[in-house]
Amino acid sequence: DGGITQSPKYLFRKEGQNVTLSCEQNLNHDAMYWYRQDPGQGLRLIYYSQIVNDFQKGDIAEGYSVSREKKESFPLTVTSAQKNPTAFYLCASRGLAGASNTGELFFGEGSRLTVL
Amino acid sequence: QQQVKQSPQSLIVQKGGISIINCAYENTAFDYFPWYQQFPGKGPALLIAIRPDVSEKKEGRFTISFNKSAKQFSLHIMDSQPGDSATYFCAASKAGTASKLTFGTGTRLQVTL
């Protein structure tokens, strides 16, 4: 089945620790995105990438880092510099070329991070 | 600055009723307006989308109404069912091959029996 796989689904972290969330897609999409979801605040863009080895900051990039070494993978690291990391994190992808450029974002099922 | 404003924050509708969720945008360059549906513990999924060359789009029980001059668009769910209970997000983006979607803050819909 084509789709986006995020792992882990639940993650607990102690303050001061970095944690990496995995996102893998087999949709052959060029663009990948990380969003953070908090109650009452909708989805806020953290980072996005249009092509391998290139990525751009979104609206709330401070305290986060990403890499895009492979087309299908876009891991997100939540660093100890992120002041309030407890949230639901969503990875998404989007086709950009030709018929796949419908504008639709496909989301994974999310990773819930709790800082203890 | 929030570019897409969504209301209401929550909505309770009886089964068989009409659910209406409204969104307003500021950026006149936006030309793609999707609605996403999210069930608890899951990622959002595209429900229906519209581009500004039409004023209305209908897919089954779901209809988007679009008012370009007022910079507003809304989602209507006809004959609402308990299975429609979810959080709904409107979004908008402007032309561009990798344009970012800007999301509203979401509406939690509960359809009661």
Image: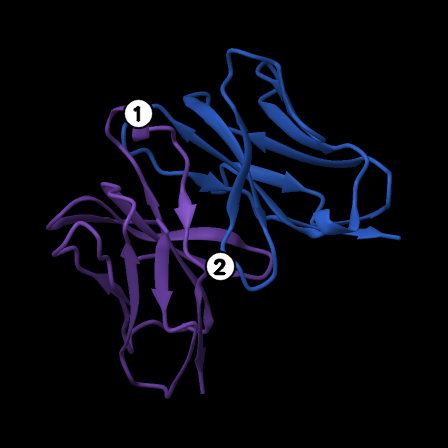
Name the foreground residue: B90 vs A92.
Answer: A92
| Residue B77 horizontal side relative to residue B46, left or right | right
For the point 35% across and 60% down, which residue is it?
A5
Residue A59 at what x, y percent from top left? 36, 50
Residue A17 at what x, y percent from top left? 29, 84
Determine crowd level at label 2: few under 14, some 14-19, many 20+ residues with C-alpha closer than 10 A. some
Q: Quadrant of the C terminus of chain A?
A: bottom left
Find numbered disc 2 in the image and state the secondary structure of the residue it sits on: strand
Residue B15 sits in quarter: top right
| Residue A64 horizontal side relative to residue B64, left or right | left
Q: Which of marks 1 and 2 is nearer the N terminus?
A: 2
Q: Which chain did the renderer colour blue?
A: B
What amino acid does circle 1 point to?
Ala
Give the label on residue A99, or none. Answer: 1
Residue B57 at what x, y percent from top left? 61, 20
Determine crowd level at label 1: few under 14, some 14-19, many 20+ residues with C-alpha closer than 10 A. few
For the point 44% across and 25% down, which residue is it?
B30
Residue B79 against residue B113 in the figure, above or below = above
**Does mark 2 fall on the same chain as mark 1?**
yes
What amino acid does circle 2 point to?
Gln
Chain under disc 2? A
Return the residue at label 2: A37
Find numbered disc 1 in the image and state the secondary structure of the residue it sits on: helix
Q: Which chain did the renderer colour purple?
A: A
Chain under disc 1? A
Report if residue B85 is visible in the image.
Answer: yes
| Residue B10 horizontal side relative to residue A74, left or right | right
Name the foreground residue: B65 vs B24.
Answer: B65
Residue A22 at what x, y percent from top left? 29, 66
